[in-house]
Amino acid sequence: MHSPGRHRRGLPRHRRRTSPRTGRAAQPRPDQRAHRHRQLPRPSIIMARGYYTRAVVSAWDFRNGQLTRRWTYDSGRSGGAFGQGNHNLSVSDVDGDGRDEIIYGSATIDDNGALMYRTGFGHGDALHVSDLVPNRPGQEVFTVHESGNQPAMDVHDARTGQVIYRAPACNCGNGRGVAADVWAGSPGAEIWSGAVGGLRSAANGNQVAARKPGSQNFVIWWDGDAQRELLDGTQISKYGTGGDTRLLTGSGVSSHNGTKSTPVLQADILGDWREEVIWRTSDNRALRIYSTTTPTSISRASLMQDRQYRLAVAWQNTAYNQPPHASFLTPDPTPHNHPRTQGALPCPCNDVNSSA
Protein backbone atom coordinates (compact mmCIF):
# COMPACT_ATOMS: atom_id res chain seq x y z
CA MET A 1 0.00 0.00 0.00
CA HIS A 2 1.61 3.25 -1.12
CA SER A 3 0.54 6.87 -1.07
CA PRO A 4 2.55 9.67 -2.71
CA GLY A 5 4.70 11.71 -0.39
CA ARG A 6 5.02 9.08 2.34
CA HIS A 7 8.70 8.43 1.70
CA ARG A 8 11.81 10.51 2.24
CA ARG A 9 12.65 10.67 -1.47
CA GLY A 10 9.66 12.93 -2.09
CA LEU A 11 11.17 15.70 0.03
CA PRO A 12 13.37 18.45 -1.39
CA ARG A 13 17.02 17.92 -0.48
CA HIS A 14 17.30 21.22 1.39
CA ARG A 15 14.63 20.06 3.85
CA ARG A 16 16.58 16.97 4.95
CA ARG A 17 18.29 18.69 7.84
CA THR A 18 17.89 19.58 11.49
CA SER A 19 16.00 22.76 12.26
CA PRO A 20 18.20 25.26 14.13
CA ARG A 21 15.06 26.64 15.78
CA THR A 22 13.63 23.43 17.23
CA GLY A 23 16.42 20.86 16.96
CA ARG A 24 13.98 18.50 15.25
CA ALA A 25 14.23 17.05 11.80
CA ALA A 26 12.99 19.77 9.48
CA GLN A 27 11.18 17.52 7.04
CA PRO A 28 7.39 17.30 7.49
CA ARG A 29 6.42 14.68 10.03
CA PRO A 30 4.02 11.86 9.07
CA ASP A 31 1.83 12.53 12.11
CA GLN A 32 -1.11 14.47 10.74
CA ARG A 33 -4.15 12.28 10.87
CA ALA A 34 -7.81 12.77 11.66
CA HIS A 35 -11.12 11.00 11.30
CA ARG A 36 -13.70 12.85 9.26
CA HIS A 37 -17.21 12.11 8.05
CA ARG A 38 -17.75 12.17 4.31
CA GLN A 39 -21.38 11.34 4.91
CA LEU A 40 -22.97 10.13 8.09
CA PRO A 41 -22.51 7.57 9.49
CA ARG A 42 -19.57 6.24 7.42
CA PRO A 43 -16.34 8.03 8.36
CA SER A 44 -13.13 8.06 6.37
CA ILE A 45 -9.59 8.27 7.71
CA ILE A 46 -7.44 11.21 6.66
CA MET A 47 -3.67 10.81 6.47
CA ALA A 48 -1.53 13.78 5.56
CA ARG A 49 2.08 14.85 5.29
CA GLY A 50 3.89 18.00 4.24
CA TYR A 51 3.88 21.52 5.63
CA TYR A 52 6.72 23.62 4.30
CA THR A 53 6.83 22.34 0.72
CA ARG A 54 4.99 19.46 -0.95
CA ALA A 55 1.66 18.54 0.68
CA VAL A 56 -0.08 15.18 0.29
CA VAL A 57 -3.48 14.33 1.79
CA SER A 58 -5.20 10.96 1.38
CA ALA A 59 -8.66 9.67 2.34
CA TRP A 60 -9.01 6.01 3.26
CA ASP A 61 -12.11 3.91 3.86
CA PHE A 62 -12.21 0.89 6.16
CA ARG A 63 -15.11 -1.32 5.05
CA ASN A 64 -15.70 -5.02 5.74
CA GLY A 65 -12.17 -5.47 7.01
CA GLN A 66 -10.57 -3.86 3.97
CA LEU A 67 -8.64 -0.59 3.82
CA THR A 68 -9.00 1.17 0.47
CA ARG A 69 -7.89 4.56 -0.73
CA ARG A 70 -10.69 6.90 -1.78
CA TRP A 71 -8.58 9.78 -3.08
CA THR A 72 -5.22 11.48 -2.79
CA TYR A 73 -4.45 15.16 -3.12
CA ASP A 74 -0.83 15.88 -4.07
CA SER A 75 0.38 19.45 -4.50
CA GLY A 76 3.48 18.33 -6.39
CA ARG A 77 6.43 20.69 -6.23
CA SER A 78 4.60 23.98 -6.77
CA GLY A 79 1.16 25.59 -6.60
CA GLY A 80 -1.94 24.46 -4.79
CA ALA A 81 -1.29 23.53 -1.16
CA PHE A 82 2.48 23.53 -1.70
CA GLY A 83 4.01 25.37 1.26
CA GLN A 84 0.59 26.18 2.74
CA GLY A 85 0.35 23.43 5.37
CA ASN A 86 0.10 24.09 9.09
CA HIS A 87 1.42 22.09 12.01
CA ASN A 88 -2.26 21.22 12.56
CA LEU A 89 -5.42 20.71 10.57
CA SER A 90 -9.14 21.17 11.07
CA VAL A 91 -12.22 19.46 9.65
CA SER A 92 -15.48 21.20 8.76
CA ASP A 93 -18.27 21.09 6.21
CA VAL A 94 -17.40 24.57 4.92
CA ASP A 95 -19.62 24.45 1.82
CA GLY A 96 -22.72 22.97 3.45
CA ASP A 97 -23.00 19.88 1.24
CA GLY A 98 -23.06 17.38 4.12
CA ARG A 99 -19.47 16.26 3.56
CA ASP A 100 -16.38 17.57 5.26
CA GLU A 101 -13.42 19.52 4.00
CA ILE A 102 -9.86 19.47 5.33
CA ILE A 103 -8.63 22.90 6.40
CA TYR A 104 -4.89 22.43 6.05
CA GLY A 105 -3.70 25.85 7.14
CA SER A 106 -3.56 28.33 4.28
CA ALA A 107 -5.24 25.87 1.91
CA THR A 108 -8.45 23.83 2.04
CA ILE A 109 -9.07 20.46 0.37
CA ASP A 110 -12.60 19.56 -0.79
CA ASP A 111 -14.32 16.30 0.18
CA ASN A 112 -13.40 14.81 -3.23
CA GLY A 113 -9.69 15.50 -2.87
CA ALA A 114 -9.61 18.62 -5.04
CA LEU A 115 -8.10 21.90 -3.93
CA MET A 116 -10.80 24.38 -2.94
CA TYR A 117 -8.48 27.37 -2.51
CA ARG A 118 -5.21 28.66 -1.11
CA THR A 119 -4.59 32.05 0.45
CA GLY A 120 -0.88 31.93 -0.32
CA PHE A 121 0.06 33.07 3.20
CA GLY A 122 2.06 29.93 3.89
CA HIS A 123 2.82 27.82 6.93
CA GLY A 124 1.61 28.52 10.46
CA ASP A 125 1.54 26.93 13.90
CA ALA A 126 -2.01 27.79 15.06
CA LEU A 127 -5.40 27.26 13.39
CA HIS A 128 -8.98 27.91 14.53
CA VAL A 129 -12.16 27.26 12.52
CA SER A 130 -15.71 28.13 13.60
CA ASP A 131 -18.47 30.67 13.02
CA LEU A 132 -16.12 33.40 14.17
CA VAL A 133 -18.20 36.21 12.63
CA PRO A 134 -21.85 35.24 13.27
CA ASN A 135 -23.32 38.03 11.11
CA ARG A 136 -21.55 36.58 8.05
CA PRO A 137 -22.82 33.44 6.34
CA GLY A 138 -20.78 30.30 6.88
CA GLN A 139 -17.63 29.81 8.88
CA GLU A 140 -14.28 31.53 9.10
CA VAL A 141 -10.66 30.41 9.48
CA PHE A 142 -8.08 32.13 11.68
CA THR A 143 -4.39 31.40 11.23
CA VAL A 144 -1.04 32.85 12.25
CA HIS A 145 1.92 32.76 9.89
CA GLU A 146 5.57 31.92 10.24
CA SER A 147 6.89 33.70 7.15
CA GLY A 148 7.97 37.20 8.12
CA ASN A 149 6.96 38.68 4.76
CA GLN A 150 3.39 37.36 4.98
CA PRO A 151 0.52 38.69 7.12
CA ALA A 152 1.26 38.02 10.79
CA MET A 153 -2.26 36.59 11.07
CA ASP A 154 -5.45 36.51 9.03
CA VAL A 155 -9.15 35.68 9.05
CA HIS A 156 -10.65 34.31 5.84
CA ASP A 157 -13.89 32.79 4.60
CA ALA A 158 -13.75 29.02 5.16
CA ARG A 159 -15.54 28.22 1.88
CA THR A 160 -14.01 30.66 -0.59
CA GLY A 161 -10.75 31.76 0.98
CA GLN A 162 -11.79 35.41 0.72
CA VAL A 163 -9.62 37.36 3.15
CA ILE A 164 -11.66 39.24 5.76
CA TYR A 165 -8.73 40.64 7.72
CA ARG A 166 -4.98 40.45 7.47
CA ALA A 167 -2.45 41.89 9.90
CA PRO A 168 0.66 43.55 8.50
CA ALA A 169 3.78 41.42 8.12
CA CYS A 170 5.81 41.40 11.33
CA ASN A 171 9.18 40.29 9.89
CA CYS A 172 9.03 37.50 12.45
CA GLY A 173 7.64 34.03 12.97
CA ASN A 174 4.27 34.57 14.63
CA GLY A 175 3.97 31.21 16.34
CA ARG A 176 1.00 31.60 18.67
CA GLY A 177 -2.54 32.86 18.17
CA VAL A 178 -6.14 32.18 19.17
CA ALA A 179 -9.65 32.95 17.91
CA ALA A 180 -12.59 32.60 20.32
CA ASP A 181 -15.30 34.58 22.05
CA VAL A 182 -13.55 35.35 25.34
CA TRP A 183 -15.01 38.80 26.06
CA ALA A 184 -18.71 39.71 26.15
CA GLY A 185 -17.84 43.36 25.49
CA SER A 186 -17.33 42.70 21.78
CA PRO A 187 -19.67 40.82 19.40
CA GLY A 188 -18.42 37.66 17.73
CA ALA A 189 -15.00 36.14 18.23
CA GLU A 190 -11.90 37.95 19.34
CA ILE A 191 -8.46 37.21 17.90
CA TRP A 192 -5.02 37.72 19.38
CA SER A 193 -1.48 36.53 18.79
CA GLY A 194 2.07 36.88 19.99
CA ALA A 195 3.22 39.36 17.35
CA VAL A 196 0.15 41.61 17.04
CA GLY A 197 -0.85 44.04 19.77
CA GLY A 198 -4.23 44.18 21.46
CA LEU A 199 -7.38 42.08 21.47
CA ARG A 200 -9.05 42.38 18.06
CA SER A 201 -12.36 41.64 16.41
CA ALA A 202 -12.44 38.70 14.02
CA ALA A 203 -14.92 40.64 11.88
CA ASN A 204 -12.53 43.39 10.82
CA GLY A 205 -9.34 43.25 12.87
CA ASN A 206 -10.20 46.40 14.79
CA GLN A 207 -8.76 46.56 18.29
CA VAL A 208 -11.51 46.10 20.89
CA ALA A 209 -9.29 46.10 23.99
CA ALA A 210 -5.72 47.21 24.56
CA ARG A 211 -4.92 44.28 26.79
CA LYS A 212 -4.90 40.85 25.22
CA PRO A 213 -5.29 37.62 27.21
CA GLY A 214 -2.36 36.43 29.27
CA SER A 215 -2.03 33.20 27.27
CA GLN A 216 -2.26 32.19 23.61
CA ASN A 217 -2.99 28.52 23.89
CA PHE A 218 -6.24 26.61 24.49
CA VAL A 219 -9.69 28.05 25.21
CA ILE A 220 -12.38 26.16 27.14
CA TRP A 221 -16.04 26.54 28.11
CA TRP A 222 -15.63 26.28 31.87
CA ASP A 223 -17.80 28.70 33.86
CA GLY A 224 -21.50 29.40 33.40
CA ASP A 225 -21.50 32.13 30.76
CA ALA A 226 -21.32 31.87 26.97
CA GLN A 227 -17.70 32.99 26.67
CA ARG A 228 -14.71 30.67 26.71
CA GLU A 229 -11.98 30.75 29.29
CA LEU A 230 -8.20 30.47 28.87
CA LEU A 231 -6.51 27.08 29.34
CA ASP A 232 -2.74 27.14 29.53
CA GLY A 233 -0.53 24.54 31.14
CA THR A 234 -2.44 23.33 34.21
CA GLN A 235 -4.35 26.56 34.77
CA ILE A 236 -7.72 27.92 33.69
CA SER A 237 -8.32 31.69 33.80
CA LYS A 238 -11.03 34.18 32.90
CA TYR A 239 -10.06 37.02 30.57
CA GLY A 240 -10.66 40.59 31.68
CA THR A 241 -9.57 43.87 30.16
CA GLY A 242 -7.81 44.72 33.42
CA GLY A 243 -6.32 41.30 34.08
CA ASP A 244 -7.04 37.57 34.01
CA THR A 245 -8.78 35.86 36.94
CA ARG A 246 -7.57 32.40 37.94
CA LEU A 247 -10.40 29.84 38.13
CA LEU A 248 -8.45 26.62 38.53
CA THR A 249 -4.89 25.52 39.18
CA GLY A 250 -4.38 21.81 38.79
CA SER A 251 -2.39 20.28 41.66
CA GLY A 252 -0.10 17.31 41.13
CA VAL A 253 -0.69 17.28 37.38
CA SER A 254 1.41 18.31 34.37
CA SER A 255 0.81 19.44 30.81
CA HIS A 256 2.24 17.96 27.60
CA ASN A 257 4.44 18.98 24.68
CA GLY A 258 7.01 21.19 26.35
CA THR A 259 6.39 24.89 25.75
CA LYS A 260 3.10 24.08 24.01
CA SER A 261 1.73 23.22 27.49
CA THR A 262 -1.35 21.35 26.28
CA PRO A 263 -3.60 18.88 28.13
CA VAL A 264 -4.00 15.19 27.42
CA LEU A 265 -7.46 16.07 26.12
CA GLN A 266 -10.09 18.77 26.39
CA ALA A 267 -13.67 17.79 25.56
CA ASP A 268 -17.26 17.76 26.77
CA ILE A 269 -17.09 14.13 27.89
CA LEU A 270 -19.72 14.25 30.69
CA GLY A 271 -22.57 15.68 28.61
CA ASP A 272 -22.90 19.15 30.12
CA TRP A 273 -21.98 21.65 27.40
CA ARG A 274 -19.10 22.86 29.58
CA GLU A 275 -15.86 21.07 28.85
CA GLU A 276 -13.71 18.78 30.94
CA VAL A 277 -9.91 18.80 30.89
CA ILE A 278 -7.71 15.73 31.32
CA TRP A 279 -4.17 16.05 32.64
CA ARG A 280 -1.60 13.41 33.51
CA THR A 281 -0.38 13.20 37.06
CA SER A 282 3.14 14.53 37.46
CA ASP A 283 4.45 11.05 38.24
CA ASN A 284 2.96 9.75 34.94
CA ARG A 285 1.05 7.00 36.77
CA ALA A 286 -2.53 8.15 36.16
CA LEU A 287 -4.90 10.55 34.44
CA ARG A 288 -7.15 13.05 36.19
CA ILE A 289 -10.38 14.49 34.82
CA TYR A 290 -11.35 17.98 36.00
CA SER A 291 -14.88 19.33 35.59
CA THR A 292 -16.42 22.68 36.47
CA THR A 293 -18.61 23.05 39.57
CA THR A 294 -20.10 26.39 38.47
CA PRO A 295 -23.89 26.43 37.82
CA THR A 296 -25.14 27.76 34.49
CA SER A 297 -28.43 29.15 33.21
CA ILE A 298 -27.61 28.12 29.64
CA SER A 299 -29.38 24.93 28.63
CA ARG A 300 -28.19 22.91 25.66
CA ALA A 301 -27.27 19.38 24.69
CA SER A 302 -23.76 17.95 24.85
CA LEU A 303 -21.25 19.56 22.54
CA MET A 304 -20.56 16.08 21.20
CA GLN A 305 -23.88 16.30 19.35
CA ASP A 306 -22.27 18.91 17.12
CA ARG A 307 -20.48 16.98 14.39
CA GLN A 308 -17.73 19.54 13.90
CA TYR A 309 -16.95 19.54 17.61
CA ARG A 310 -16.91 15.74 17.77
CA LEU A 311 -14.45 15.61 14.89
CA ALA A 312 -12.37 18.35 16.52
CA VAL A 313 -11.95 16.15 19.59
CA ALA A 314 -10.65 13.42 17.24
CA TRP A 315 -8.05 15.67 15.57
CA GLN A 316 -7.16 17.66 18.71
CA ASN A 317 -3.91 15.74 19.24
CA THR A 318 -2.78 16.10 15.64
CA ALA A 319 0.74 17.60 15.48
CA TYR A 320 0.65 20.93 17.40
CA ASN A 321 -2.48 20.39 19.49
CA GLN A 322 -5.29 22.92 19.12
CA PRO A 323 -8.51 23.34 21.15
CA PRO A 324 -11.72 21.87 19.73
CA HIS A 325 -14.21 24.29 18.16
CA ALA A 326 -17.89 23.71 17.43
CA SER A 327 -19.71 24.83 14.29
CA PHE A 328 -21.25 27.62 16.42
CA LEU A 329 -19.39 30.34 18.27
CA THR A 330 -21.30 30.39 21.57
CA PRO A 331 -23.69 27.91 23.24
CA ASP A 332 -27.24 28.27 21.98
CA PRO A 333 -29.43 29.44 24.90
CA THR A 334 -32.47 27.73 23.36
CA PRO A 335 -33.44 24.59 25.32
CA HIS A 336 -32.34 21.29 23.79
CA ASN A 337 -32.81 17.68 24.71
CA HIS A 338 -31.27 16.43 27.92
CA PRO A 339 -30.12 19.78 29.33
CA ARG A 340 -28.39 19.98 32.67
CA THR A 341 -28.59 23.41 34.26
CA GLN A 342 -27.72 22.76 37.88
CA GLY A 343 -23.97 22.88 37.30
CA ALA A 344 -21.56 20.21 36.20
CA LEU A 345 -20.62 17.33 38.45
CA PRO A 346 -17.87 18.24 40.91
CA CYS A 347 -14.53 16.61 40.21
CA PRO A 348 -13.61 14.03 42.87
CA CYS A 349 -10.15 13.91 41.25
CA ASN A 350 -10.04 10.12 41.42
CA ASP A 351 -7.06 8.83 39.47
CA VAL A 352 -7.69 6.80 36.33
CA ASN A 353 -4.93 4.25 36.16
CA SER A 354 -3.11 4.72 32.85
CA SER A 355 -2.49 1.00 32.52
CA ALA A 356 -6.18 0.11 32.67
Image: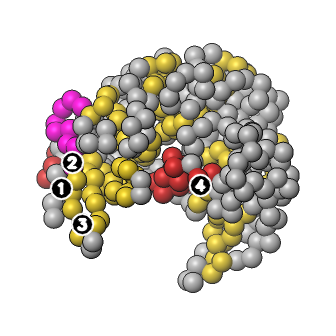
Q: Name the residue under label 2.
A: 72
Q: Residue at x 66, y 18 (%)?
A: 207
Quick one: label 2 or label 1, which is nearer the N terminus? 1
Is 155 covered by the magenta stretch?
no
Mark 2 residue type: Thr
Q: Main secondary structure of the magenta part?
A: loop
Measured from the top left, where is residue 226 in percent x and y? 74, 39
Quadrant, the N terminus: bottom left
Q: In the displayed structure, would residue 78 be above or below residue 58? A: above
Quick one: label 2 or label 3, which is nearer the N terminus? 3
- The reply to whether dot 1 and dot 3 touch (C-beta < 8 Å) is no
Q: Distance between the residues labelled 2 and 4?
A: 29 Å
Residue extent of the magenta highlight: 71-80
Answer left or right for 203 relative to 66: right
Mark 1 secondary-structure assignment = loop
Quick one: label 2 or label 4, which is nearer the N terminus? 2
Measured from the top left, where is residue 161 in percent x and y? 39, 25
Q: Residue 7 lies in what quarter of the image?
A: bottom left
Q: Name the residue under label 1.
A: 3
Mark 4 secondary-structure assignment = helix
- Nearer to me, 10 or 89: 89
Mark 3 secondary-structure assignment = strand
Q: How far apart are marks 4 and 1 (CA)?
A: 32 Å
Q: Which of marks 2 and 4 is in front?
A: 4
- Residue 67 is marked as 3
Quick one: label 1 or label 3, which is nearer the N terminus? 1
Q: Which of marks 4 and 1 is in front?
A: 4
Mark 2 secondary-structure assignment = strand
